[in-house]
Amino acid sequence: MLIAFIILYLLVTLLIGWWASTKVHSTQDFVIAGRNLPMFVAACALFATWFGSETIMGASSEFVENGLIGVVEDPFGAALCLVLVGAFFARPLYRLNILTFNDFFRLRYGRSAELISAIFMIPSYFGWIAAQMVAMSIILSAVTGITAFEGIMICTIVVVIYTYIGGMWAVSVTDFIQTIMIVIGLLLIAYQVGTAAGGIRKVLASTPDGFFNFLPEASFDGVIHYIAAWITIGLGSIPQQDVFQRVMAARSAKTAVRASYLSGFMYLTIGAIPLFIGLCGHILYPGDIHSGDTQMVIPFMVLEHSGIFLQIMFFGALLSAILSTTSGAVLAPSTVIGENLVRPYFKDISDQRLLSIMRLSVVGVALASALMAMWNQNIYELVGQSSALSLVSLFIPLTAGLYWRRASNFGALASIIIGMAVWVVCEFIIPTGFPSLIWGGLASLAAMVAGSWLRPDRTYARFKEATA
């Protein structure tokens, strides 16, 4: 019966995509839902940007193995990101009335910065999308016994169909529905497994000394790695198209700001529930969990301690969350390909032709991510690599472009290229033991400052004139 209802959930998801397709008449509808989402729907969409496999399965696994300090990156860093977006980025970007994050680079720095930022942004999504595909394959394997390859293929096919036809409207509607369902499902599961484990006090008391320590060890190396954990998603996911699209889809700048704050609060509070469930699993089945894949903690608990109704609700909502998260992540680079890589070379291209190109890009991005999912199946690692790419190349040019008048085109290009180059060297060629994203971020900052002082220009003045 559980398998039958999971299939039904997937079909309903496709039906929502079909319904959403009736609202898609232009690229603006496809990319940012016509800028018409009310505050709570926009907040749910922002909350659901990452609240899927990473938080429910990846973070709970890290929590069981490494304690509270092991999940600084997510959910704490993710919540920080959403709050910072509301405080410093949502309002000024919303007022520009643009479709993609890279459009800002064109307005602020010029065509070359737009092109380079798009080229650097697109690959950063492959790891994130792959993580969602891995998560779905794990769930389908637990429930149906299919292989990881088959699960990844099913996820890819459903996501491609759903995103291809519905765009951001489909993402937003399912984000809203799955947020309600996943919260209810997680609370019910937490109550059941918490009771089975002896209650909250017994669960918390069973943890070893230092398990809830939230501060780093008093050493230079410990502090640096702690900072790196905070900023991986906390800063690295700010210059991302999927976050930008959800902000731009709100009805107004004020709505976008409030939705960002609310989603940050939701992420931090709701994100604590899977951590508790994972800890209960550690107590109830310590041998089974540690001898197998710890990413299976929560699915294992649901299958062992829940009736069929709760299993249907939980797995259906979780699959919906993963599909919605994956769809938004696939949509983001696909819109960048159409808007920032293809459109500038075809000045007279029609809106409908551009919409078709974006939809075809959905297929290509999904297939590339599926290949990556088959290569690496560690959810937490895939997500961390994804956020690091945007942190070391795009965060500094975005922030400087908004808040530093002297930021120049040359400085932005130097910041993007040098930041990424240093990160690649430190990550893959000459490992230093020091977090490579710190080296990359510092190099990006230094290149922006040096490049802007050495080669100043009037890009800020032209930007203000163009957006006045």
Image (spheres, grey):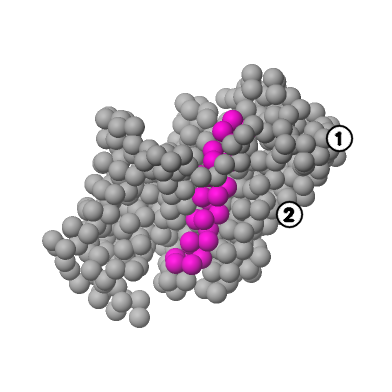
Residue at the disc numbered 1: 307
| Disc 2 secondary structure class | helix
Q: Magenta segment range? A: 63-90
Indicate yes or no whether the magenta region holds residue 85. yes
Task: Name which residue lies at 38% across and 49% down.
Answer: 391
In which quadrant of the rendered image does the N terminus lie?
A: top right
Decide which of tag 1 and tag 2 comes sooner along the chain: 2
Q: Position of residue 229 (x, y in %)?
A: 46, 44
The number of callouts visible is 2
Indicate yes or no whether the magenta region holds residue 173. no
Q: Nearer the viewer, residue 223 or 430?
A: 223
The relative height of residue 362 versus residue 279 in the rendered view (above or below) is: below
Task: Judge whether residue 284 can be spotted in this image.
Answer: yes
The relative height of residue 79 versus residue 389 in the rendered view (above or below) is: below
The amino acid on which the numbered mark 1 sits, given as a three-letter code, is Gly
The amino acid on which the numbered mark 2 sits, given as a three-letter code, is Ile
* Mark 1 neighbour density, 10 Å: few (under 14) some (14–19) many (20 or more): few
In which quadrant of the rendered image does the C terminus lie?
A: bottom left
Residue at the disc numbered 2: 180
Q: Nearer the viewer, residue 351 or 107?
A: 107
Disc 1/disc 2 C-alpha distance (Å): 20 Å
Q: Position of residue 172 (x, y in %)?
A: 62, 57
Task: Name which residue lies at 66% across and 29% down.
Answer: 296
Q: Nearer the viewer, residue 196 or 323?
A: 196
Task: Name which residue lies at 47% across and 71% down.
Answer: 91
